[in-house]
């Protein structure tokens, strides 16, 4: 039986963005019910019980994050909605915001009720104009309907939502970068600890949640913990650190597929099934060579490489849950944005594009990332012009290994994400890189690099 | 007692709140750093101070699996710090019980590699133009690369070459390509001066320090960003291309431009002062100095300086050698004091050191007890200028730096000498309406305009006027004798600042050859035999005047801080 979408259930309805349409589908009934029947701590407990993990990339348990707030804090406590969706090829938040903003906003309101926040900042990246307008219109509707503001529905609960438009930078998706940017500063991620739950926006306790996470919060409170846990993958008994991957997930497909799309499926669908069945297979009848399973910073899988410990399976068969991409050496599930690279595309061009992105988006605060991303781009640029050297591959891996929060050399995780695709691409496609270096062939896409060495 | 272990060496930290860099310093281990500065906020972004840390607990050391920035990591009882120089530790110390799994990679190797990696990264886009860089010789990028870096670069690609920015300030220039983005300068203008002229523009490896267009770095503390810059990016236009720093001799001085009495470093070569820098002294001013003080040394090198004694004969000043001049002066003042002691006055300026004021005062009081000692004019310009400032230019608490309105270094010191020698401080105003027969004006004002503003224009100067000063003033114009004075860099002595804090400093350069120091002159007038030894006179002052008793103790030099 095909899975019936929940998060995307309304996106094709006419007027899906309007309040009356959302209400006709039972919208804000959950909120009214929770406001009447449940205490905030009960909501937190319910989210904790559901095993909901953050959809923004790191997969941190949402309910657990909420419990990090100081107990009995006099306030204010803030919620920041992270809608700075900047990972390449990722657009699951965008669809929710553009097509069903009220579903997210109800999640925002419920989350604020749970964490006792009276103000939420909805941080939308600049490039998302339609999403911004749809969200702002929906917030205006809520104020007009008395669902935001003071003493909502006579309950004594107050909430304001401020829709904030960013200025377009990847680093603003890092939660403390987002907070700095929101405060009007340069989005340089903060040193942690203190974590935002203790000292966040405007030095007050702050929770930063992703758009899709908040949509899930809405659906969990509407349909219950059992529904949520009936979907997805339970924790791996052999991995004590796995918290399980429950619930539905929006997967976006991009790159060389026949049908780029955003599909909602229970967690744990295999990469092969997602591409072949939901994406209509690789385009032009070609074969997939490499796939980026969860946003660029998660690294690459090689489709014909055998999967370690699983007989007869290749890396193409990894399940897309929080644990799956790790089995193939990727950083994690990330944003579940799948980018397919066909067998006619050079990995050198792919990696060049990757390095260009991270060199452009490194905020420049920490030396290893600022200089490392730029260096990797310069090396890749030279390699693309047919002037690569074999030792460049070792330098790239060395730099990729040494920058990031994991080796301890940077403040935030951007550098880990910048290094991971470099490491995985070179390790998995070393033959191709070495052949290209040996042949000295220039990529047909090579041109002078606007970003390097000006 | 809370104990921290640095490369196995235990060091007690007491109740102090320290980070790893500070704790290691107490153990005698230096952790290199760029962005961290004691007076500025912690950003932990340069990643030079990476160390390995762990905790000694229940007889075992649990190390963190990754390197951490030492500047951002606080220490507590039992913290174990392993630096990149672990292999240079004291071998006699017993090693701590480290986890054998951790020590599969030798201790300190992780930190050492991380630091070398950081230096490699910093040099990727650095022009390596040390031969033409003013900072060469005192550059932290040079020093640390030499000590902790690799000998060759693996970078073969084109370096970024952002344009230089000489327009960022009238006193400071920015060599953009040399910058390592430690942001000390940006934080200084935000946190200490509060004027926030500097900012970071661009992203990633194209990031640069810049100003907002049309808003240059012009504040009275701006020069400090040059001291703060660990590399040759920010250069002082005043010092640019004047000297290679390894030719400079550094002496600990005290600024004489206001009553704060900032501790300074005086950098000189061949008896010419080329540069003043801040010397950290929390008892005086803290970590910084103002631009008035920083660039306030040019009077010492000025062409119009008095460099030899002159006598007015037939309306013109003629040089006269000291050996003829001194007996003449002594004789004239002795006669004047014998005929009419109330008509003899010695003005002792607040620019004199305690020792000079004491000896000169002793001489004039020895002529006759009725001879009066008068405190010289004390320039007060405006109000105390407090920093940091907010956007409206108002000072913001907590105040981190004050440029004082009183533009003299030693009013309190001279006053205390006067009180001790004649029981009271007589201001200049009491004598300007009297008819005097002889006046000795011991000046030493670095800024003649400050003095001229305080001299009454209708003051009928006595026929016997001796003016001792650095530069021409109204007092020197009216004088019969002009004696050259020494600047604050050309003498040993003690200043007492606004808060009563006495600082002794030593001579950085010799005065021009024919200039006789005030102390020497007083010595000669008193007819004392032998060499002038400022330290001995200091002891004499300490013994004679209870206020200065502390100077009698062997005066410990203020601790010099590594910056």
Image (cartoon, rainbow, N blue to C red):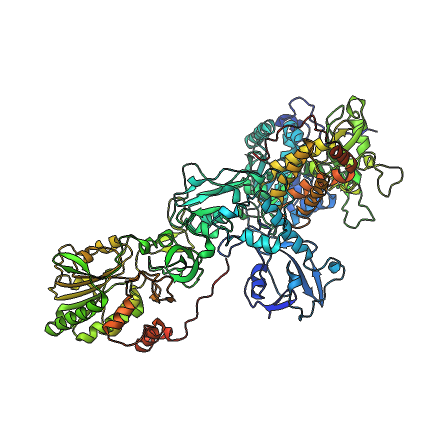
Residue shown at the point (59%, 60%) measured from the top left: B20
Q: Residue B556 or B188: which is nearer the viewer?
A: B556
Q: Residue A97 or B171: which is nearer the viewer?
A: B171
Left or right: residue B488 versus residue B201 is: left
Q: Position of residue B150 (x, y in %)?
A: 63, 51
Left or right: residue A25 versus residue B456 is: right
Residue lying at the far right of the rendered structure: A311
Q: Residue B492 or A338: which is nearer the viewer?
A: B492
Q: Is residue A41 visible?
A: no
Q: Is residue B482 above or below residue B537?
A: above
Q: How many marks?
A: 0
Left or right: residue A187 versus residue B342 is: right
Q: Is residue B557 visible?
A: yes
Residue shown at the point (20%, 72%) measured from the top left: B364
Q: Is residue B323 above or below residue A168?
A: below
Left or right: residue B534 versus residue B372 is: right
Residue shown at the point (59%, 52%) measured from the top left: B145
Q: Position of residue B140 (x, y in %)?
A: 53, 53
Q: Is residue B220 above or below residue A286?
A: below
Q: Position of residue B16 (x, y in %)?
A: 54, 65
Q: Quadrant of the N terminus of chain B?
A: bottom right
Q: Quadrant of residue A87?
A: top right
Q: Position of residue A70 (x, y in %)?
A: 61, 52
Residue shown at the point (67%, 71%) measured from the top left: B92
Q: Residue A270 or A98: which is nearer the viewer?
A: A270
């Amino acid at each position: 039986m095909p899975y019936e979408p929940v998060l995307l259930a309304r996106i094709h309805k006419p007027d899906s963005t309007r309040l009356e349409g959302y209400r006709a589908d039972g919208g804000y009934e959950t909120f009214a019910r929770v406001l009447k029947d449940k205490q905030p701590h009960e909501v937190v407990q319910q989210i904790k019980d559901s095993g909901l993990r953050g959809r923004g990339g790191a997969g941190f348990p949402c309910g657990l994050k909420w419990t990090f707030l100081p107990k009995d804090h006099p306030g204010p406590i803030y919620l920041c909605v992270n809608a700075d969706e900047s990972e390449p090829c990722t657009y699951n938040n965008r669809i929710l915001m553009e097509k069903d903003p009220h579903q997210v906003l109800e999640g925002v309101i419920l989350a604020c009720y749970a964490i006792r926040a009276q103000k939420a900042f909805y941080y939308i990246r600049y490039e998302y104009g339609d999403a911004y307008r749809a969200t702002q219109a929906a917030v205006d509707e809520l104020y007009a309907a008395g669902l935001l503001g003071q003493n909502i529905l006579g309950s004594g609960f107050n909430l304001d939502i401020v829709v904030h438009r960013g200025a377009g930078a990847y680093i603003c998706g890092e939660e403390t970068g987002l907070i700095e940017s929101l405060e009007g500063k340069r989005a340089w991620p903060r040193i942690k600890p203190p974590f935002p739950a203790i000292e966040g926006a405007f030095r007050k306790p702050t929770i930063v949640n992703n758009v899709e996470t908040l949509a899930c919060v809405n659906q969990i409170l509407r349909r219950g913990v059992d529904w949520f846990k009936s979907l997805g993958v339970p924790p791996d008994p052999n991995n004590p650190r796995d918290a399980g991957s429950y619930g539905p997930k929006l997967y976006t497909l991009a790159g060389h597929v026949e049908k780029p799309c955003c599909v909602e499926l229970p967690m744990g669908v295999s990469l092969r099934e997602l591409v072949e069945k939901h994406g209509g297979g690789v385009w032009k009848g070609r074969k997939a060579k490499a796939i980026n399973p969860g946003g660029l910073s998660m690294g690459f899988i090689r489709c014909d490489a055998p999967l370690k410990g699983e007989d007869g399976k290749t890396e193409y068969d990894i399940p897309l849950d929080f644990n799956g991409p790790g089995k193939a050496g990727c950083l994690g599930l990330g944003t579940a944005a799948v980018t397919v690279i066909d067998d006619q595309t050079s990995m050198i061009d792919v990696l060049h594009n990757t390095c260009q992105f991270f060199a452009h988006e490194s905020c420049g605060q920490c030396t290893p990332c600022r200089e490392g991303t730029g260096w990797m781009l310069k090396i890749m640029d030279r390699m693309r012009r047919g002037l690569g050297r074999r030792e460049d591959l070792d330098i790239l891996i060395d730099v990729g290994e040494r920058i990031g929060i994991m080796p301890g050399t940077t403040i935030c995780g951007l550098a880990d994400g910048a290094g991971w695709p470099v490491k995985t691409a070179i390790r998995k496609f070393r033959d191709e890189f070495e052949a290209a270096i040996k042949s000295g062939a220039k990529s047909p896409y090579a041109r002078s690099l606007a970003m390097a060495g000006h | 007692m809370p104990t921290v272990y640095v490369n196995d060496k235990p060091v007690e930290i007491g109740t102090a709140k320290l980070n790893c860099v500070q704790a290691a310093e107490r153990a005698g281990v230096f952790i290199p750093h760029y962005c961290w500065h004691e007076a500025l906020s912690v950003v932990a972004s340069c990643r030079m101070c990476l160390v390995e840390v762990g905790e000694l607990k229940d007889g075992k050391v649990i190390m963190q699996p990754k390197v951490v920035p030492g500047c951002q990591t606080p220490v507590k009882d039992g913290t174990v710090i392993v630096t990149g120089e672990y292999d240079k530790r004291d071998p006699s110390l017993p090693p701590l019980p480290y986890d054998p799994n951790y020590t599969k990679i030798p201790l300190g190797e992780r930190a050492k590699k991380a630091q070398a990696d950081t230096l490699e990264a910093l040099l990727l886009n650095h022009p390596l133009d040390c031969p033409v860089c003013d900072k060469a010789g005192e550059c932290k990028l040079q020093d640390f690369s030499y000590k902790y870096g690799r000998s060759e670069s693996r970078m073969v690609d084109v370096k970024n070459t952002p344009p230089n920015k000489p327009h960022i300030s009238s006193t400071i220039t920015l060599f953009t390509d040399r910058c390592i983005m430690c942001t000390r300068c940006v934080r200084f203008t935000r946190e200490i001066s509060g004027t926030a002229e500097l900012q970071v523009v661009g992203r990633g490896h194209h990031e640069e320090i810049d100003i907002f267009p049309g808003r240059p770095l012009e504040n009275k503390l701006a020069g400090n960003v040059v001291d703060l810059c660990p590399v040759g990016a920010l250069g002082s236009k005043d010092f640019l291309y004047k000297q290679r720093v390894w030719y400079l001799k550094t002496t600990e001085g005290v600024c004489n431009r206001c009553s704060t009495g900032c501790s300074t470093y005086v950098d000189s070569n061949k008896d010419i002062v080329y540069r003043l820098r801040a010397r950290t002294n929390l008892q005086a001013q803290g970590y910084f100095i103002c631009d008035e003080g920083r660039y306030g040394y040019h009077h010492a090198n000025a062409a119009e300086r008095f460099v030899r004694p002159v006598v007015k004969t037939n309306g013109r000043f003629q040089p006269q050698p000291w050996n003829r001049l001194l007996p003449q002066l002594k004789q004239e003042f002795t006669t004047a004091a014998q005929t009419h002691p109330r008509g003899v006055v010695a003005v002792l300026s607040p620019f004199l050191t305690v020792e000079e004021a004491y000896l000169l005062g002793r001489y004039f009081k020895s002529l006759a007890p009725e001879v009066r000692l008068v405190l010289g004019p004390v320039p007060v310009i405006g109000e105390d200028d407090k920093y940091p400032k907010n956007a409206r230019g108002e000072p913001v608490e907590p105040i981190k730096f004050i440029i004082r309105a009183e533009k003299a270094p030693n009013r309190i010191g001279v006053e205390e000498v006067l009180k001790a020698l004649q029981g009271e401080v007589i201001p200049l105003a009491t004598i300007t309406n009297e008819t005097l027969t002889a006046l000795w004006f011991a000046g030493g004002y670095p800024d003649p305009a400050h003095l001229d503003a305080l001299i009454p224009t209708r003051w009928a100067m006595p026929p016997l006027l001796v003016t001792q000063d650095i530069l021409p003033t109204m007092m020197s114009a009216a004088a019969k004798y002009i004696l050259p004075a020494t600047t604050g860099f050309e003498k040993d002595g003690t200043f007492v600042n606004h808060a009563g804090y006495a600082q002794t400093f030593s001579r950085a350069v010799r005065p021009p050859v024919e200039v006789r120091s005030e102390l020497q002159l007083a010595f000669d007038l008193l007819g004392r035999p032998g060499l002038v030894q400022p330290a001995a006179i200091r002891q004499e002052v300490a013994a004679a005047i209870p206020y200065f008793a502390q100077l009698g103790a062997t005066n410990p030099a203020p601790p010099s801080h590594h910056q």
